[in-house]
Image (spheres, rainbow, N blue to C red):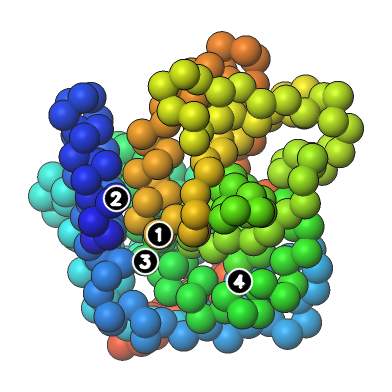
Amino acid sequence: MQVRAYRSLQDIRISNPEYSPWIDLIELTFEECDKPEWSQVEIFPNIGSRDPAPYIHGANISLRQQLLQDWAHKLLTKGLGESESINKMIDSNLPELTTAAISQDMANAEAICSQYGLDEKSMEVMLPLLVTPLLRSISIKAASYAAIDAGERRYCPICGAWPLLLEYRGLDRSRYLRCGRCAFGWEISWSMCPFCGNRDHRSLESISTQVNSLRKVETCSQCKSYIKAITTLDALHPDELLAEDLASVELDLIALSNGFQRPSGLGFQPITLVTLKGSKKGLWPWIKT
């Protein structure tokens, strides 16, 4: 785990002990991401997929069954406790659960969890973390391709998620959006809403606090969305993204109290095929028409 992210999470744990269960899961995920085995994930992109689809849309993602099973068991038992229901779900429905997590198909994920009597709300919190090591690995492999193809993309060019944070980088304060799922970063122009593309400066504002001059909220009155922004010399380490998001909750409260919201779901819902090596199961998720 990156040192600054670890220290930030410990500070949050001390000041807000009610966050400790969530911080435990985040730290566990960061430790998992550090394992070199995740670099062996293979992705075979769909060369027929064109803009505006993200890189993973239509791709075949291949990884070792044991790697994903071990991680799923570690994460879910940490969050829910040991149970035979978790073991049965992992043994029988892990590819389906993984594809649902990648596309944030919560209806499908909840249907799977309900078969085993697992708490659906708790699973909804943990599913994004389930695919974090996988998506980070893909982001590293596809970074050079996505950087060329990103353009003025408002959702992540790798995984389709809405950006988590906005960075003002370096002395020239270039604007970069950062994905909270795969940690990819891509540059966007000034005076543009990252969610609806609005460029009318009269409806784009920022709100800051006296507590930390490096953090602020940028809002758009056209789509009523907001994004938290941070000034930094270099790109934040992937581990720092969730830590920074958690450390700046006061900005969320300010934005929400002024009637702004973060967009829900994904900017683009990717469809993927997850194939587990050592297993015959490879499953396309159910697609609603």
Between the C-alphas of marks 1 and 2, the distance is: 8 Å
Q: Is 35 located above or below residue 93 in the figure?
A: below
Between the C-alphas of marks 2 and 4, the distance is: 27 Å
The amino acid type, in three-letter code, at marker 4 is Ile
The 10 Å Cα crowd at callout 1, few under 14, some 14 to 19, many 20 or more, is: some
| Total number of numbered discs in the rendering | 4
Q: Position of residue 258 (x, y in %)?
A: 62, 13
Q: Is residue 86 visible?
A: no
Q: Which residue is mark 1?
A: 237
Of the pair 62 and 209, the residue shown nearer to us: 209
Q: Which mark identifies residue 5?
A: 2
Q: Residue furthest top?
A: 257
Of the pair 86 and 47, the residue shown nearer to us: 47
Comes first in the chain, label 3 or label 1: 3
Q: Nearer the viewer, mark 2 or mark 3?
A: 2
Comes first in the chain, label 2 or label 3: 2
Residues under numbered marks 1 and 2 in contact, where contact means CB atoms less than 8 Å apart: yes
> Which quadrant: the C terminus?
bottom right
Q: Which residue is mark 3?
A: 133
Q: Position of residue 206 (x, y in %)?
A: 66, 26
Between the C-alphas of marks 3 and 1, the distance is: 14 Å
Q: Residue furthest left?
A: 82
Question: In percent of the image, x 25 and y 74: which residue is there?
Answer: 35
The amino acid type, in three-letter code, at marker 1 is His
Q: Is 268 located above or below residue 124 in the figure?
A: below
The amino acid type, in three-letter code, at marker 2 is Ala
